[in-house]
Amino acid sequence: MDDKLLSLVSEVIQRSTRQRWADAVLRDLLKRHGGLSRNQSAAISRAVFSYYRWFGWLEPSGQMDEQIDRAKALAERFAQQPASFSDDELVARGVPRWLKEETEISPQWIRALQAEPRLWLRARRGQGKALAEKLGDSHVLGEGLLSDILEYRGGKDLFRTREFHVGEFELQDLSSQAVGFVCAPLSGETWWDACAGEGGKTLHLSDLMENKGLIWATDRVAWRLEKFKRRAARARAFNYRTGIWEGGPKLATKTKFDGVLVDAPCSGIGTWQRNPQARWTTTLEDVKELSKVQEQILVNVGPAVKPGGKLFYAVCTSARSETDGVVDAFERQCPEFKRLELRDPLAASLGPERQLYLRPQRFGGNGMFIAAWRRGG
């Protein structure tokens, strides 16, 4: 990497903070340096994320350019010779030490975290195989529902493709898509995506509902919902309403729902492959505080579920406080909700389980936890 690109990588890392993630800083930098080639931009991006992915192997007191070169070399070595890293070394260096209080740290999981993330697409319902032929370099995950999940392995800028601009697909992580399949909304039902963010799961619910019925999409901040509306227009999804909801007992609507999805704010431990910077900024205190937020959101949405309706809880984390801890606390406070058994849509051969853990080392997506209940009536 030449000095110019190395300097830009260093600038991204030095400007990245807990309040402003590296990916946002990187996007701004690439916009400001519009003369960079696509290969140069890709090299900067890889170097930035390699730095955070291999941060546990770096000497903090060293010069930044030396640390960047060291991280790049480690990433290349792992890609070519993964067995040259021992399990003990990966577990000791790959994640912060506090994590062992909250989750099992297996060598297989760390190896998944150290690999480059895969790029997953969600095609419109029933159009996965046709989309794969159009885009090329695409692997269809399976048959049935899984035929609309594609792993893209090519080098196109997908945001510039005609297929993207006419709404034939969304970039959506594999485990995020699994949440929609677990919810399995029916055409004509009424749903609430309580923590919708920019609407990836809302759009999937809409597609599964054949754009019929109604979905309320709420979030704490308006700009996320505005971005969702633009995505919905491109996807030609119209069966939704939006509203601001900050998670408190006063709900955004008096509607009673067939299904409610709480994709709650969480520590994001399950995204540490795709967002390696978060490994070194997230704290145990964050996990404990977020578990209280998650518990309260679940309790507050409960009254919006119809008798006989379903409530789904999904978080991209494996922390016990945010998974089992939140589920147990909710069931103590809301005994009218009875746990549902769930089937893993990515592993149809497995039997029903009381809750699902989708793990990066098994499927290649984010880590995800899912639990669900039916409201008694």
Image (spheres, rainbow, N blue to C red):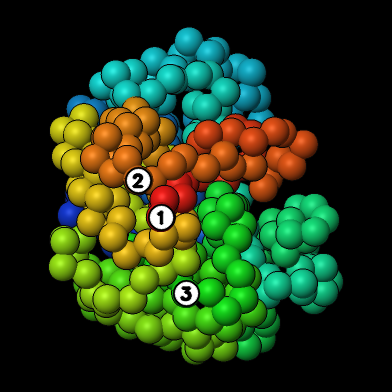
Query: Residue 181's quadrant in the figure?
Result: bottom right
- Quadrant in the picture for the C terminus: bottom left
Disc 1 residue type? Gly
Q: Quick check: 106 above or below 23?
A: above
Residue 237 location, x and y as percent?
A: 54, 85
- Please tell me whether mark 2 or mark 3 is closer to you in this view: 2
Q: Position of residue 321 (x, y in %)?
A: 29, 31
- Name the mark on residue 377: 1
Q: Which numbered dot is residue 190?
A: 3
Q: Nearer the viewer, residue 48 or 331?
A: 331
User: Circle 2 sits on which residue?
Assistant: 336
* Residue at 54%, 12% in the rendered image: 86
Residue 284 point in image, percent of width and height: 21, 30
- Check whether the beta carbons of the residues at disc 2 and disc 1 lie within 8 A of each other: yes
Compare marks 2 and 1 and give the one earlier in the sequence: 2
* Residue 45 seen: no
- Precedes in sequence: disc 2 or disc 3: 3
